[in-house]
Image (spheres, rainbow, N blue to C red):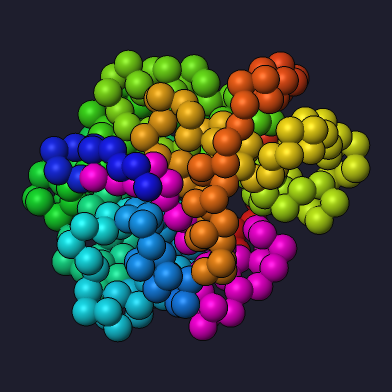
Amino acid sequence: MKKVTIGSNLNISKICFGTSALGNMPDTYGYEVDPFQAEETIQAILNSSINFMDTSRNYGMGRSEKLIGNVLKKVGGKPADFVLATKIDRDMSTDILDAESAKRSFDESITALGTEKIDILHLHDPEHCHNISDVTESGGALDTLFNLKDQGLVKLVGLAMGNIELMEKIIPNWPFDVLINHNRYTLLNRQADNLFDLAYEKGIKIFNAAPFCGGVLAKGSERSNRLVYQEVTKKDLLPIVEIEKICANFHIPLGAAALQFSLRDKRISSTIIGITKKERIDQTLDWAKTPIPEEAWSKLLSLPYSTEDPEAGRAYKLG
């Protein structure tokens, strides 16, 4: 797996495995994940050619980080060449994300993960916070994030969220190393296109998350009716059916097209995808190297796509 250098000395694979579903979030993904299966998958990731894993304090209300910490303890700690990213999260009981809650979130993360330092730390989902000024004001959560970097506790810092409008307001005012945006640069949606241009020009490394739109662009429209974490109608799935037709004509797995759409973009340093079974690792690597002819790309990229917020109508419930 090809790697890219970010910061001064972090080499990350072009694919990153996300661990939100491993924390068991049935309200988001529509299914349960057994803890044994989750730890088995994490172990397999550590043994794979993918050296980059992403988690968060609030994935599964802390379960994702705890499971990762359990596995790291079993293997004697995080491998030296493995890159682990997590996120500062709001207090989930109050939705407050101020300096105090940001510091507490970080302390909880390093305790759960069993590490003294974090390779990459993002501030997460400020659009869901009680008061955005708690995040952006002097001495607020963002100042806390950058202070952790100044103290040497974090190598790189970033912003991870969905809302493009708010992200475009925050990004120009802070010296972020990296960013994550999810579900907004896919075969179905290009809302993040201008944001990615802005970040790329500023030298901010981009991690594009959820190229499968919550799973349907990996499973297919016959096996899933969930689009961006919501159940949808057959009419809503028609754009996916058109993608599937092109993939079928060229004998291309749907997941390969969805993944490589992100991998082939020069602005994107790594693409974050979620997995819940160790078997998905080899499948992902196969999809990454599946030959896709230019004629197929020409047809896929000529299809209509949305530039609207894919989560605008979502009944948001984290869990």
Does residue 185 lie above or below 25 as drawn?
A: above
Residue appearing at x 67%, y 49% in the figure: 218
- Residue 167 vs residue 49, the one in the foreground: 49
Visible in this render: residue 32? yes
Residue appearing at x 72%, y 20% in the figure: 299
Residue appearing at x 48%, y 29% in the figure: 264
The image quarter containing residue 32 is bottom right
Q: Is residue 62 magenta?
A: no
Residue 164: x %, y % from top left: 52, 28
Q: Is residue 13 magenta?
A: yes
Q: Which residues are magenta?
A: 11-38
Report the quarter where the C terminus lies.
bottom right
The image quarter containing residue 250 is top right
Side (left or right) of 129 relative to 218: left
Residue 181: x %, y % from top left: 48, 37
- Residue 87 vs residue 226, the one in the foreground: 226
Residue 209: x %, y % from top left: 50, 42
Side (left or right) of 248 relative to 90: right
